[in-house]
Image (spheres, grey):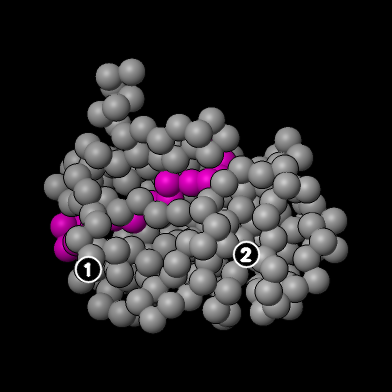
Amino acid sequence: MRILAIDTSTEQLSLALWQDGATLDHACPAGQQHSSLTVPLIQQLLAEAGCSPQQLDAIAYPVGPGSFTGLRIGCGVAQGLGYALDKPLIGLSTLAALAASVDANQVLACLDARMNQLYAGRYRRTATGWENVLPDGLYNPEQLPLPEEDGWHGVGNGFAAQPGLQARAPQLQVVDTQRLPHARELAQLAATAFQRGEAVPASEAGLVYLRDKVALTTREREKA
């Protein structure tokens, strides 16, 4: 099984190819250049892996939260590949990918949402994967529900943007303020999702806009 994962949700561009349990990945600072860098980097990654686009089984991409423009680019590239190759897509949470990058069983993932707000979600590792125990949401820092028990790991640039958050949460044993979502974990989560039958046709792929509380597929956007 081969799954290509594309993450354009932040200023970092990352790609990963999951092949039967092994992952090859690349990342680079993209700034505002995701649209010009993503396809050439995909071509480079597939060539390095000796994998043709037709050999892919699915394409994974982040549904959000993250940069609105970046998410649209990632979804658009994934849909373009899905249509061209007749391959299904797997949309996943960037916060889930961020949580999965941490060697811990309980993770509070936070991303800077600008406008003095945070995107956050809480995840707990289980025998079958990750459980989202606090649904991804947009929060004012002082209103973010924090875990009550000890043993949690905080991760994401939201902690750097809102340093007072860490002071409110002594139950966070470790806080990594620099880590960003990466396609490597997106690909790993996508492999599990694909095996559960959660891939969808390109026409049904969409994004989740937490700021506006809107989740639309391409078909729904066309009807709007």
When asked about the image quadrant of residue 109, the answer is: bottom right
The magenta region covers 51-68
Q: Nearer the viewer, residue 33 or 69?
A: 69
Q: Is residue 55 magenta?
A: yes
- Residue type, numbered disc 1: Gln
Spot occupied by residue 196 in the image (x, y as percentages of width and height): 23, 65
Q: Viewed as shown, does residue 141 lie left or right of 101?
A: right
Quarter placement of the C terminus: top left
Q: Secondary structure at mark 2?
A: strand
Vertically, is 156 above or below 162?
below
Q: Residue at x 44, y 40 (%)?
A: 208
Q: Which residue is mark 1?
A: 195
Q: Nearer the viewer, residue 109 or 81?
A: 109
Q: Residue at x 19, y 41 (%)?
A: 83
> Reading the chain from its start, which is encountered first: label 1 or label 2?
2
Q: Viewed as shown, does residue 58 lie left or right of 206?
A: left
Vertically, is 53 above or below 176?
above
Q: Nearer the viewer, mark 1 or mark 2?
A: 2
Vertically, is 216 above or below 179?
above
Identify the disc placed on residue 117.
none
Q: Which residue is mark 2?
A: 108
Q: Secondary structure at mark 1?
A: helix
The number of numbered discs placed on residues in the rendered structure image is 2
Spot occupied by residue 178 in the image (x, y as percentages of width and height): 70, 64
Spot occupied by residue 138 in the image (x, y as percentages of width and height): 61, 43
Q: Nearer the viewer, residue 153 or 81?
A: 153
- Residue type, numbered disc 2: Leu
- Taking the view exactly as shown, the residue that stands out farthest to the front is 148
The answer to whether one can see residue 5 in this image is: yes
Q: Is residue 168 magenta?
A: no
Q: CA distance from mark 1 to mark 2?
A: 26 Å
Task: Please rate how many residues cluster around mark 1, counting C-alpha atoms within 10 Å: few if below 14, some from 14 to 19, many from 20.
Answer: few
